[in-house]
Image (cartoon, helix red, strand yellow):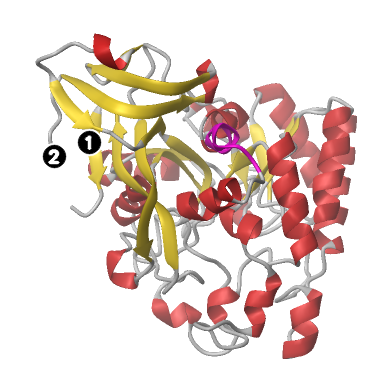
Amino acid sequence: MPSPRRLLIHGGQVIDPSGGISGLFDVVVEDGRISALVEPDQAPSGIYRIEADGMVVTPGFVDLHTHLRFPGFPEKETIASGTRAAAAGGFTTVCAMANTRPVVDTVEILRVIEAEVRRSAAVRVRQLAAVTMGLAGEHLTDMPALVAAGAVAFSDDGKPVGDVDIMESALRASAELGAVISVHEERAGSAGAANPGPARQLGLAAWPCTWEAEMVARDVGLLERTGGRLHIAHVSCAETVQIIRMAKQRGLPVTAEATPHHLRLDDSLLLGTAILPPGSPQTKVNPPLRDRSDVEALVAGLADGTIDAVATDHAPHAAPDKEGSFAQAAFGFTGLETALPVLLDLVRAGSLSLPALVERLTEGPARVFGLDAGTLRPGAPADVTIFDPEARWTVAPEILESRGKNSPLLGHEMRGRVSCTLVGGQVVHVAGV
Ligand SMILES: [Zn+2]
């Protein structure tokens, strides 16, 4: 793919919430950085052009929550395949979770990942480190050393930090280091499978919203006492949105993310659709899909800024992990390649504006982890996403770049597609190529 020293993205509708920009502009890229946004008739001539007529041009999307499965699970995903999926979905920075094998709990493992990222990543990868050694919840990792080595934040994602004293110590360290703790909130030691409604109908173990809300309330309480920087991963319940909203009103340093699937799909999916049978393992995710009132509360929280960012929780699995019974199947959906069209449905429904959605995919997440990303301001790295909001396509295993084909959206028609993605001025994805 072409990567000239100078290029022009011509004729698109540019939306850059970081600069309050929404309108027809040409984007000039020079030496891997944004050089200028100019009126279309003032664009310099004679340089390489990417035609963006009818397209929306935004800063590259930033994902705070991606499972790249490296090291340890090449049958599910690799850094090469996961970052190709990111590029195809318009994500130019992904923050990779630490629940790998081995767990990312030492500087040595961070170095191994860095080397693989240099070798094979299509987009920028930032790595989270674990809060506790081996995600066992007993001993904190060497957080100062991990921050010094480049860990972007800390998380035991996949599990809650059950022990109050450990969580308090982690927040104290977070306060000293200025590092963010991203928490996966569920009742420690619990074993639910689905939201109580469908769980009852399908004979599955129930996983109620209280299990999430009680942990968020605990951690907001700890935060108030100790300081630090708390980030709530994949919020799924109305109660949780309300706890976070009140905490923010009190000025506490808490942020939150929600996934495209929790913002768009509800637990009725578990009872079957035209495509999926009742109790399909393709509908099993952690936290579980919730009911319509939770979905609406999440969307309202995204619109009013209680939820700072959309994060995919892209969780690829190999086919056998999702076969068999619902109870035995692995949790998780892939999400990088379907996030944009799923979220554009919210804009089309009038639930939030397109600039607000773009903010929650760019500047919002960049601010949560303090990343130099999510903006088209002159001088910034030229990480750019160009998408056609109307293009229709159908989700099918053979067109997904991710090794994981575990999406409840397989067979569904999507509206909206990334046509071109640039990282540092280099074209890393073109639709259909
Ligand atoms: Zn999680």
* Secondary structure mostly taken by the magenta-highlighted segment of the chain: helix
Q: How many marks?
A: 2
In the rendered structure, find residue 1 and report the number of the disc placed on it. Answer: 2
Q: Position of residue 406 (x, y in %)?
A: 45, 71
User: Which secondary structure, mark 1?
Assistant: strand
Q: Position of residue 57 (x, y in %)?
A: 38, 31
- In this rendering, the answer to whether 259 lies above or below 247 is below
Q: Nearer the viewer, residue 311 or 266?
A: 266
User: Which secondary structure, mark 2?
Assistant: loop
- In this rendering, the answer to whether 331 lies above or below 200 is above
Q: Amino acid at mark 1?
A: Val
Find out whether residue 314 is within the magenta segment.
Answer: no
Q: Which residues are magenta?
A: 352-360
In the rendered structure, find residue 427 and report the number of the disc placed on it. Answer: 1
**Which of the two labelled residues, at mark 2 and mark 1, occupies the earlier sequence position?**
2
Q: Amino acid at mark 2?
A: Met
* Residue drawn 77% across the image and 88% down it: 201
Please identify the quarter of the rendering in which residue 64 is found.
Answer: top right
The crowd level at tag 2 (other Cα within 10 Å; few <14, some 14-19, many 20+) is few
- In this rendering, the answer to whether 40 lies above or below 143 is above
Find out whether residue 355 is within the magenta segment.
Answer: yes
Question: In the rendered image, which quarter contains the N terminus?
Answer: top left
Q: Position of residue 248 (x, y in %)?
A: 82, 31
Contact (Cβ within 8 Å) of mark 2 with mark 1: yes
Q: Is residue 269 left or right of residue 378?
A: right
Query: How far is mark 2 from mark 1, CA to CA?
Result: 6 Å
> Would residue 205 be seen by someone viewing this image from the given angle?
no
Residue situated furthest left in the rendering: 46
Q: Is residue 320 left or right of residue 5?
A: right
